């Protein structure tokens, strides 16, 4: 079995306001830096064998305290990068609400391709590929991957058999921990949207002696 922890980056000044997408130079704000420290503390007792991250600054900055605490390098994995929102990148959510395509994002996301960017189907395919590769590279181990909200939700949805059109029913908050266990009998959800400031879920505590 392989256990993969999926961690969303901490808060930035864009969270809840703008679509960051592939924008470079979006850093954690003061609260986000605190959250990164809380995540490191939460992961400190787990038997992690590797730490992976999206190449964007906000994910790398969230991963850094955990990597330092565990003595692991951060391995950048491009398949975990945020959705490429194309022409919508950087726009405020307020400016998007009246657009027909934005309504389609929430009604039938499986049909959506962002102008000049990716489709949700393409994003899900690359995330699933990354998860499969991690399972091959880390049999019977636990690893962590720091990524982005939609990326994590798409990976969780596929792994749990949830149709892509329903992936937004999953909540993945900033600096949250979700975890999947991949084994010969299928995939199990160990944790979903766990906030680092509270005790670890029982399923992860049991893996301290992994």
Image (tube, helix red, strand yellow):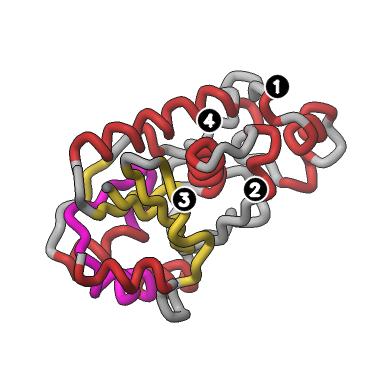
Residue 76, by quadrant, is top left
**Which residue sits at x=75%, y=29%?**
108
Pointer 2: what residue? 18
Label pair 3/4, CB-CB below 8 angstroms: no
Residue nearer the viewer, 32 or 106: 106
Residue 101, by quadrant, is top right
Residue nearer the viewer, 149 or 179: 179
Pointer 4: what residue? 84
Say which of marks 1 and 4 sits in front. Answer: 1
Residue 52 within the segment the image draws in magenta = yes
Is residue 201 placed above or below 18 in the rendered structure?
A: below
Separation of residues labelled 3 and 2 (CA atoms):
11 Å
Label pair 3/2, CB-CB below 8 angstroms: no
Is residue 206 placed above or below 73 in the rendered structure?
A: below
Residue nearer the viewer, 104 or 177: 177
- On the image, the x and y values in percent for residue 92 come to 71, 46
Q: Which residues are magenta?
A: 38-61
Q: Mark yes or no: residue 16 visible.
A: yes
At mark 2, the secondary structure is: loop
Pointer 3: what residue? 26
């Amino acid at each position: 079995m392989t256990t993969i922890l999926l961690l969303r980056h901490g808060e930035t000044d864009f969270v809840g306001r703008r679509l960051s997408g592939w924008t470079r130079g979006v850093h954690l704000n003061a609260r986000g830096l605190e959250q990164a420290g809380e995540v490191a503390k939460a992961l400190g007792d787990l038997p992690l064998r590797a730490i992976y991250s999206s190449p964007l600054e906000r994910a790398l900055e969230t991963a850094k305290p955990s990597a330092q605490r565990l003595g692991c390098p951060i391995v950048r994995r491009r398949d975990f990068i945020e959705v490429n929102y194309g022409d919508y990148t950087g726009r405020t959510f307020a400016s998007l609400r009246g657009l027909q395509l934005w309504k389609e994002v929430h009604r039938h996301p499986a049909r959506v391709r962002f102008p000049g960017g990716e489709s949700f189907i393409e994003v899900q395919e690359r995330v699933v590929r990354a998860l499969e590769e991690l399972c091959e590279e880390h049999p019977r181990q636990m690893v962590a991957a720091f990524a982005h909200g939609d990326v994590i939700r798409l990976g969780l949805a596929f792994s749990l058999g949830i149709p892509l059109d329903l992936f937004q029913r999953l909540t993945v908050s900033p600096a949250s921990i979700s975890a999947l266990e991949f084994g010969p009998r299928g995939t199990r959800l160990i944790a979903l949207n766990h906030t680092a400031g509270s005790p670890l879920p029982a399923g992860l505590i049991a893996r301290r002696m992994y």
